[in-house]
Amino acid sequence: MKKRGLLIVLIILIIGSSLFAYTGFPNFFYPDVSFRPTSARIEAMGGTGVATATGNDALYYNPANLASRKFSLNLPSVSVTLFNPKAIIDEGIIESIMEMDGDDTSSMLGIVKDYFDIVRAGKGEVLTTDIALGFTAGGFGLGINVQEQLHTHSSDGSFTSDKLMAEVNVGLSLGYGYRIKVVPNILSIDVGASVRFAYKAYTNRIGASELMGLFGDEDADIMDLILTEIPLAAGWAIPIDIGVNFNLPVGFRVSAVARDINGKYTMKEYPGMGLWLNEMTGFIGVEDIYEGTADPDLIDEFAPVVPWKLDLGVAWAPSFGKVDKFVKPTIAVDLVDTITMFEKVGDNPDAFWNYFRAGAEVRLLSVLDVRAGFNQGYFSVGVGLDLFAIKLDASYYWREFGKEIGDKPVDALTVRVNLGFDR
């Protein structure tokens, strides 16, 4: 029984922890962007959200959208994103899990091996979980978001080079949007800003073979090994987003948002998770929990900076009066990180597609949302079902993890359940 429990812990850590041989965190900040939660609606619409994001999404995509004063409530909202779902199904991994004998350790290891066989060279993802609490009303927005991510990395796509990394992000966001009516029924301007306390923690890259060696001793203290041997980097930033919308006749909107202003992170590198745990419990006045051998003198500090970005968006969401209860369309186009885009396009015109997003949504009978999009050359689809106090959303899409479009596309499935309201 002990052996089985050890193996389960090992598999969880392989699939849920890690991706790097330890070389020190000061030269490694992952990822080099600020935190943004996964949105099933936005992913289905090709990643567009600058002019169309609502509710909690507006706090991260464009706080000027809060000026609509729409009410939303997350109590909570839970999203789960699985990457490589098509390959998982095609390789029969789900069937293998269902048929597995609980005491068959070789079968468990075989399933892990089968999964890693579908991980190709380069970066990738395994699983992302998002939990949100918050509300928007009267132009104000407040949100608490927690996100867990499991990243993959492989130098050549072989099992021996496969590595993983666990990352956790926490965001506490406060935003406000205000509408200025310039010419009634012709032009109004929305301005908005959000400030966010963002906390990020991620493990160092650890390979499957390293973990097997780490947990190979059945007499070892598993928790002490985790707290002593797995390095961690953690820290915080207070980025600011500022957005503006120009609302025009017939439902047209032109938007811009400057994201990640003041995106400087104050990070610490911990040679073992236990030292980080002691620091966290110390904030609430609890004595050190970890008393292992990780050396506190090896804790180092570094300050990576996430560069600010300028995103542009255009949307058309016409209103047809009472017909809106039956059919209400929305079409959106975004250009993200436009400063970098103009720099890249000068040398390579095809680079434009890396920054182009387009999407559409049609609401039917005020209950069903049908969505589709185009993101970096890949199509996306999704649906939403509004059951008054419960909102269900699902999206299927592709993400590019290579340097160029087509290098490493990975499919993903996001399912979201929101208890509350999102109008």
Image: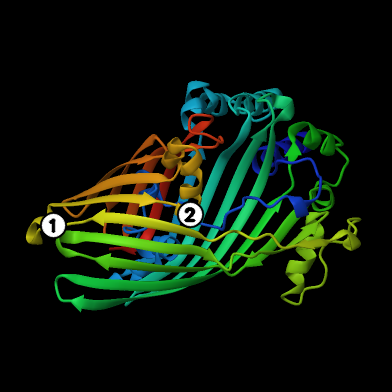
- Picture coordinates of residue 210 (x, y %)? 80, 35
Q: Is 124 on the left or on the right of 362, as rendered?
A: right
- Picture coordinates of residue 173 (x, y %)? 50, 70
Q: Is 321 on the left or on the right of 180, as rendered?
A: left
Among the two numbered marks 1 and 2 on one chain, the one whose residue lies closer to the N terminus: 1
Quarter that holds the N terminus: top right
Residue 306 vertical placement versus 341 (above, below)? below
Displayed quadrant of residue 257:
bottom left
- Picture coordinates of residue 68 (x, y %)? 28, 70
Which residue: 82% across, 38% down?
Answer: 215
Residue 340 vertical placement versus 69 (above, below)? above
Q: Is 203 on the left or on the right of 197, as rendered?
A: right
For the residue marked with disc 2, what is the amino acid?
Answer: Ile
Task: Name the residue carrying label 2.
Answer: 339
- Numbered label attached to residue 420: none
Q: Nearer the viewer, residue 189 or 234?
A: 189
* Circle 1 or circle 2, nearest the eye: 2
Give SS at disc 1.
Answer: helix
Displayed quadrant of residue 126:
top right
What's the colour scheme? rainbow
For the residue marked with disc 1, what is the amino acid?
Answer: Asp
Which residue: 43% across, 38% down?
Answer: 349
Give SS at disc 2.
Answer: helix
Q: Is 125 on the left or on the right of 362, as rendered?
A: right
Q: Which residue ends up furthest to the left in the rendered image? A: 322
- Picture coordinates of residue 103 (x, y %)? 68, 29
Displayed quadrant of residue 356:
top left
Measured in 3D between alpha carbons, the distance from the residue under mark 1 to the one under mark 2, in whole angstroms, is 37 Å
Task: Name the residue carrying label 1.
Answer: 324
Would you call the spot at circle 1 few (<14 residues within 10 Å), some (14-19), or many (20 or more)?
some
